[in-house]
């Protein structure tokens, strides 16, 4: 409960409300369209049976009930054991193995622990309230999200411990129950390590879904800048390229904040800098702003793009570990200008 009391306010504090407004499902156009689709299907179905029955649709889907339906649907998803033990977070970069946050074999312990909690509601009502409150940051934002559900972990652990203690007492006649439990845990741990090292780390380490190329591009940008180049990078290569550049080149956070320039607000409401220091610029690949071949003719410049330029050979291509797929293409400005003059 202490971790909840210390952490939960941070999700709704003044500095976080802007992000909350962006992710709040009640403000989501996607969810509104989805429930409008449900309403239309409802009307179409009942009209064929009896037009008078469409009143059911009007009662179920209206401006007062739809927000409640959206909220209840999201809460049910978060109360479901699917996230905890089976599918986990849908984001590949937050959940590389695409598995539940806890081992599947712990599911029975969670079920039994949950039953104990509700059976002894008067004793554990504060804990149950804390469990539900810990779901709120993710519940109000849509699909189960690992980061937003981080404050739920202590409550799940306590529930699992209650379930384990109850089952251990029930199976006390089994002489080696603790040893069997430890063995199963060891097997699952070994399976996880093998799965992560082979399937995730070895096979998918350089795939697009894990944004592995972001590190390569960020380090490449840093190398060019050290060599006196001005770098123009496609801002659509991956989300928030300025953060990757600062992180992988180990730039001091204070210097990072002072280096942002030409900051604008994107369609989602996030602030994005178009410039980092004097030698790094982020721009849309479709923009012609930086292709000024008349000025600074002798300046060393490179362009890092998401897509190749027809008729030009890039000086460098950032590829995956199989060397089959290109993620970023680097061109010298002199080459681009020479092609433009032709």
Image (tube, helix red, strand yellow):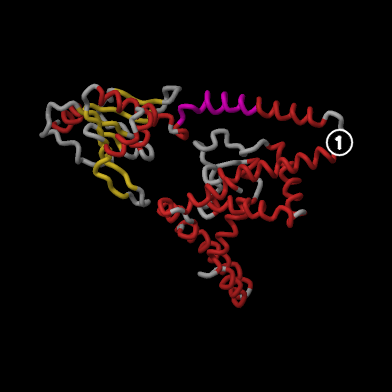
Residue drawn at x 36%, y 39% is 240
* Residue 23 is a magenta residue: no
Q: Is residue 126 above or below residue 90?
A: below
How many tags in the picture?
1
Q: Position of residue 276 (x, y in %)?
A: 27, 36
Q: Is residue 2 visible?
A: yes
Q: Position of residue 95 (x, y in %)?
A: 54, 37
Whether residue 285 is visible, yes or no, is no
Nearest to the observer: residue 298 or residue 19: 19
Residue drawn at x 54%, y 28% is: 200
> Of residues 189 and 254, which is closer to you in this image?
254
Specify the quadrant of the image occupied by residue 282. top left
- Per the image, is 205 magenta? yes
Image quadrant where one finds the C terminus = top left
Q: Magenta region, mostly helix, strand or loop?
A: helix
In the image, taking residue 204 as reference, residue 304 lies left or right, namely: left
| Residue for badge 1 | 172
Residue extending farthest to the left is: 294
Placement of 6 over or under 59, stated as above or below:
above
Question: What range is drawn magenta here?
Answer: 191-207
Q: Which residue occupies 55% across, 53% down? A: 136
Picture coordinates of residue 63 (x, y %)?
Answer: 51, 69
Q: Position of residue 245 (x, y in %)?
A: 34, 32
Residue nearest the viewer, comparing 219 with 30: 219
Q: Is residue 86 left or right of residue 32?
A: right
Is residue 84 depicted above or below 177 in this figure? below
Task: Provide the secondary structure element on which disc 1 rests.
Answer: loop
Which residue is at the far bottom? 52
- Which residue is painted at 31% across and 44% down in the image? 272
């Amino acid at each position: 409960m202490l971790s909840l009391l210390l952490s939960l306010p941070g999700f709704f504090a003044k500095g976080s409300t802007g992000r909350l407004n962006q992710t709040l499902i009640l403000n989501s156009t996607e969810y509104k369209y989805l429930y409008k689709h449900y309403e239309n299907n409802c009307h179409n179905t009942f009209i064929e049976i009896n037009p008078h029955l469409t009143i059911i649709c009007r009662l179920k889907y209206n401006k007062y009930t739809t927000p409640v339906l959206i909220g209840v649907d999201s809460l049910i998803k978060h109360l479901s054991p699917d996230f905890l033990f089976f599918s986990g977070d849908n984001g590949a970069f937050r959940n590389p193995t695409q598995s539940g946050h806890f081992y599947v074999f712990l599911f029975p312990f969670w079920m039994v622990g949950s039953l104990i909690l509700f059976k002894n509601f008067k004793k554990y009502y504060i804990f149950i309230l804390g469990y539900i409150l810990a779901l709120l940051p993710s519940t109000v934002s849509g699909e189960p999200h690992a980061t937003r559900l981080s404050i739920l972990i202590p409550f799940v652990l306590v529930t699992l411990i209650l379930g384990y203690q109850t089952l251990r007492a029930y199976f006390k006649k089994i002489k080696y129950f603790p040893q069997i439990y430890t063995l199963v845990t060891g097997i699952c741990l070994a399976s996880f390590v093998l799965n992560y090292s082979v399937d995730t780390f070895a096979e998918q380490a350089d795939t697009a879904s894990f944004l592995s190329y972001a590190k390569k591009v960020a380090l490449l940008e840093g190398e060019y800048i050290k060599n006196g180049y001005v770098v123009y990078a496609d801002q659509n290569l991956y989300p928030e390229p300025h953060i990757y550049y600062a992180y992988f080149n180990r730039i001091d956070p204070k210097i990072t904040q002072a280096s942002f320039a030409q900051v604008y607000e994107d369609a989602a409401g996030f602030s994005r800098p178009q410039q980092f220091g004097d030698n790094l610029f982020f721009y849309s690949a479709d923009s012609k702003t930086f292709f000024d071949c008349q000025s600074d003719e002798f300046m060393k410049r490179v362009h890092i793009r998401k897509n190749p330029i027809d008729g030009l050979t890039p000086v460098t291509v950032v590829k995956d570990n199989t060397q089959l797929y290109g993620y970023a293409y680097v061109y010298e400005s002199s080459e681009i200008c020479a092609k433009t003059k032709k």
